[in-house]
Amino acid sequence: MKLFSLRLTTLKSKLYAIVFASFVVRVVAFFALPNTASNLAPDEGQYAYLVEWVSQGKPVSEYPLFGPNLYYSARSIIWPSTLFYHLGFDSLDSIRIVASIYGLLITMLIAMTINKVCDKSVHVKSFCMKNQHMLVILLFALTFTPSHFTWSVLGLRESAVEFWTILIFTVIFFLFYLKVNISPPIAILYLFSIVMLYSSRPQVGIVLSTVLILYIFLQIKSRNAQILIPITIILMPLPCTTNFGFFLH
């Protein structure tokens, strides 16, 4: 029985216990959900239909509901969903799996960030030890708040929007607070995350890019800022291209 014993004695173990619990509950929720679009999120039926449409190789320009608009503004969840569709899952299950994976990754990302911050210095580590119950409760609340958890297991793009937004802010946090030197992989991750955010909800991408430029300019003396400024500015016109400009009309 010792094999199954779990000793949650450290902050790290408690945080990752929440990650594991999130995984288990998501698996249970996946099998418990109805085989039709939920009344809580009727839009997931539209996303599921789009996954099936794209997976069958049909042109998105001929998509009957919203033309290419829905596809271009939700590619970050449609693309991976097509992979699960080709693996044999139906379109609704595919979109739900991807949304739930995004939700799980959000919890993992925040748990990882908390652990990294708590190891930054002796003073910060001491603060974390004294307040570890608060940190655990906050992560638990973020993960399992009913409204938040529900739309992260249904086939909606909100979990993708949240994940890419948090990932971008995490990169910024590591670069300017933890003073991590920017490297090609980090720069690529930053660029890719912004592109994927635009592919989740372009409006959020525009707002976030504007905020990032303003913040990074305030850090202009930093080498990290000098590298990120041109990357962010170059990405700003994305919503004005053919694929993203639809929502401005």
Image (cartoon, rainbow, N blue to C red):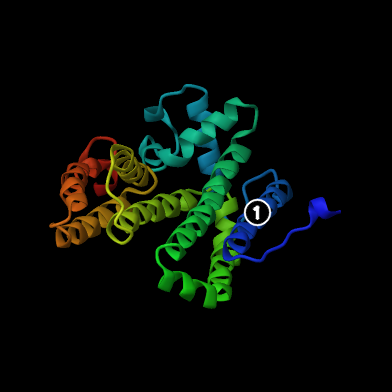
Where does residue 122 sit, x and y in percent of width and height? 43, 70
Tag 1 residue: 20
Q: Residue at position x 35%, y 44% from top?
A: 193
Furthest-bottom residue in this view: 130
Residue 171: % across, % down: 34, 52
Depth order, front residue of 219/107: 219
> For the point 50% across and 29% down, which residue is it?
53
Q: Observer-nearest residue: 106 or 181? A: 181
> Disc 1 marks which amino acid?
Phe
Q: Is residue 231 above or below residue 217?
A: above
Q: Where 205 falls versus 86 (above or below)?
A: below
Residue 188 appears left or right of 62: left
Say if 139 sits above or below 187 in the image: below
Q: Position of residue 212 (x, y in %)?
A: 24, 56
163 or 10, which lies in front? 10
> As displayed, is residue 235 above or below residue 222?
above
- Dot 1: within a 10 Å radius of its alpha carbon, few (fewer than 14), some, or many (20 or more) residues? some
16 relative position to 183: left or right: right
Q: Where is residue 248 in the image (x, y as percent from the top left)?
A: 24, 48
